[in-house]
Image (tube, coloured by chain):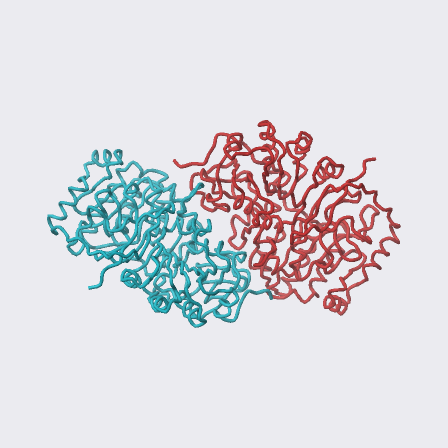
Chain colours: A cyan, B red
Amino acid sequence: MNSKLVASLREAIGLAGLHDGMTISFHHHLRNGDHVLNMVLEEIAGLGIRELTVNASSIFDVHAPILEHIQNHVVTKLQCDYMAATVGRAVSQGILDTPVEFRTHGGRPRDIALGRTPIDVAFIAAPTADPMGNCSGKYGKSACGSLGYAFADARYAKKVVVITDNLVPYPLQDWSIPETDVDYVVTVDAIGDPKGIVSGTTRITRDPVGLVMASQAAQVIRHSGLLKDGFSFQTGAGGASLAAAKFLKDIMVAEGIQGSFGLGGITGYMVDMLRAGCFRSLLDVQCFDLQAVESIRDDPRHQEISAQHYAAPGDRSAVVDSLDVVILGATEIDTDFNVNVHTDSSGSIMGGSGGHSDTAAGAKLAMIIAPMFRARLPIITDHVTCISTPGRDIDVLVTQGGIAVNPNNTELQRRLSDAGLPLLDIRALKEKAEAITGKPRALPRGDRVIAQVFGREGQLQDVIYNVPQK
Amino acid sequence: MNSKLVASLREAIGLAGLHDGMTISFHHHLRNGDHVLNMVLEEIAGLGIRELTVNASSIFDVHAPILEHIQNHVVTKLQCDYMAATVGRAVSQGILDTPVEFRTHGGRPRDIALGRTPIDVAFIAAPTADPMGNCSGKYGKSACGSLGYAFADARYAKKVVVITDNLVPYPLQDWSIPETDVDYVVTVDAIGDPKGIVSGTTRITRDPVGLVMASQAAQVIRHSGLLKDGFSFQTGAGGASLAAAKFLKDIMVAEGIQGSFGLGGITGYMVDMLRAGCFRSLLDVQCFDLQAVESIRDDPRHQEISAQHYAAPGDRSAVVDSLDVVILGATEIDTDFNVNVHTDSSGSIMGGSGGHSDTAAGAKLAMIIAPMFRARLPIITDHVTCISTPGRDIDVLVTQGGIAVNPNNTELQRRLSDAGLPLLDIRALKEKAEAITGKPRALPRGDRVIAQVFGREGQLQDVIYNVPQK
């Protein structure tokens, strides 16, 4: 029987020819339940290979063991689109000699495809695979749904290792990544912890502030001129964003509006909208919860897309170019509407653009939902600590204290004003918040660049400095 | 609304930057009903563009107008995997100054991917498309099912024009080729004639000679040691091959054998085998009939595959590498088991390898079914006019007069002998035929090379000479 199965991960690493100084890649569909990045790095460390670049679509808290490999110089450079706080804090304290390279979910596959960030060996965490490497995220005990972020890694890496805990007979019927992209297949006991891979369906917020923002957000969309047949929509998985989606669904159902597609990381709330007839299809680059995983497996209207198809900039197109409305978050937004989603209130890394910049650039209406302040720190500042998404791509900020429209979008300004929504200049909104919280002190900032933020078109958009230790 | 729609095919050709000396490409899923190749060449001729190379996965009789464009030097070179007799005859008579380049269905996408045969502008005949270029062959009045041969063209061509007669709202839900590969979309009244695109289900042969061969073929497979759970199978659409599939199905159902997959150009007979439980899935690069088109649209076990995934040689894998048995045809086979499917009894081009060489190389058992003679010309010769598939890849020849096993396959020889099947040395089979037909005269052959036949690994395998005019 023809097979690409090898006896162990260690053997696959050897066959792939991995050696010092190379770049390896990972995708993050197993989210905070992922075992694969850690097990691969442990094997590599055991083999004595050093000075690797890790290109991971996202790095989660579960990946904290990478810090030890950084200290031991097994890993000397990171490239990612998102980095959770545990690793982010260590990076912000200066654990790496080389700055982290942040990209967007669309910029990452574009740079891989163009050879700007070549990958030597890609490791694909595959919830189901056959012995020739055809693989899928839809089936198996570690099912995660879409494998959209991994497509570019599989297609363009010099060597591709599929790691699975559910090997099925050839051929896997409903593959996402074809055997033509795969060199080796390894079976392990568990590629992840199902509890961390997908949550149960996230509950919408019950927080009164969140509900006010969500309701206002739905009204902004209703009056934007975009909510009509053919409407398309993306939202994040935060409580207020999901509440906004729920309010939006109620409006669409009541008014009989038939949208075209829901996009993005998909939650059960988007699945509910599909089933309620709000969309003809869902285009899914990542499943956030079990309901989304079941839907992408069973409902042909719910389709997997690659990160390139989702969001890559270039001379052809991606779905974000056809998107009407996206709801996004922010840790900071400044009076030029620049948004920070990379660093927290201490300036320490705890996020990243993901699809933030891509969808903001593509969507006709890019909305930020954020409270006026968090833990008595105002959200609106004069200058964000880090420009994750440039203000030119943001159309409106919705807070519990009022709505600020980017003055560049005069049509939206007029429409929302005509609808009687509570509009304020973003500077007035900033003052309103500061009247409650007081003016925050300037952040202490180090003088060493510990991260570079590349905009989705590939340009160096901003840098992040180290956080001085107390 | 975002859109890649352009007003006319002429405008798309202009925007794509087509100029003298470039290469354009086509795929053949619309078969003898295709209008697209002809309409594109007519526009190009009208624009005064000349000296083009046409890389078409196959050229059918419906494409006869290309001969006029060759005479007018609009087209000066052809690359294809198959060429039907109308154009083949003119090529054999020397209409082109440059030899035709024949490749296999697997070699063609490999050479496109490697940049050996770069495509400047690919024209994709799409039975359904949306305004951003997501397209499918499964839906619309010109539905053809799989678009498998077009994937490489779409992915690697510098510019890609989708031509459709069924434009649907964005996003097309179940796309085959994504918008990320597409530059322009053009709508036309009809991309093809449904009567020529897919036939009704082909009837199995009722010819007694064909039925004898089919029955023997099924017995060879039964006793090959391969017909067991997990069995995989491909067959052509000829009457005797289909009859063999029917006999095979009866055996599999009676014996409760559950195969793994059916592969290739798919007919209703393969769909029947899927439904009867003979296979877990069908992997489909091209639909031959309406039943196959309906099945690939409606049955998730029936999956579209790209030509690369189907058959491309290389360092990873294609499905043919996992294939157990393929049934193939021949216009000639020689005593070294070399097979000719390129030329007819006069030496004139009337075919091509298609997937013949790819499946023969990949399959554990590659079987030729052919009558001992056609129109009193024996099939077995000392040396085939053209080596389409090398004899080392052919395991057995089944005729109505006996079965000849390639002596290299001693295990098959033993198994079939043990089963009591009527085995003969291929030389004895040749003599048996010639005892009936007499020894044929040698073919008159010209001295000019009018075609090059590249083996699937990319090497020049044989050449075809012109046919002297009487």
Q: Nearer the viewer, residue A414 or B199?
A: A414
Image coordinates of residue B379 in percent, x first then y, are 80, 51
Residue B321: x %, y % from top left: 61, 59
| Quadrant (top left/top right/bottom left/bottom right) for the N terminus of chain B | top left
Quarter of the rendering containing residue A254:
top left
Nearer to the camera, A353 or A188: A353
The answer to whether residue A194 is seen in the rendering is yes
In the rendered structure, the answer to whether residue A414 lies left or right of residue A428 reads: right
Q: For residue A315, which quarter of the picture?
A: top left
Q: In the image, what residue occupies the spot 22% across and 46% down?
A: A334
Residue closest to the eye, A460 or B196: A460
Residue A316: image location, x then y, percent: 45, 41
Q: Is residue A102 above or below residue B364?
A: above
**Residue placed farthest to the bottom in the image?**
A46
Residue B74 appears at what percent x and percent y? 64, 31
| Residue B146 in view here | no
User: Quarter holding the C terminus of chain B?
Assistant: top right
Looking at the rendering, which quadrant does residue B396 occupy? Answer: bottom right
Seen in the picture, residue A412 relative to B285 is either above or below; the reply is above
Depth check: give the residue in front, B398 or B79. Answer: B79
Horizontal side, residue B170 vs residue B396: left or right: left
How many labels, in total? 0
Q: Does B176 sit above or below residue A467?
A: above
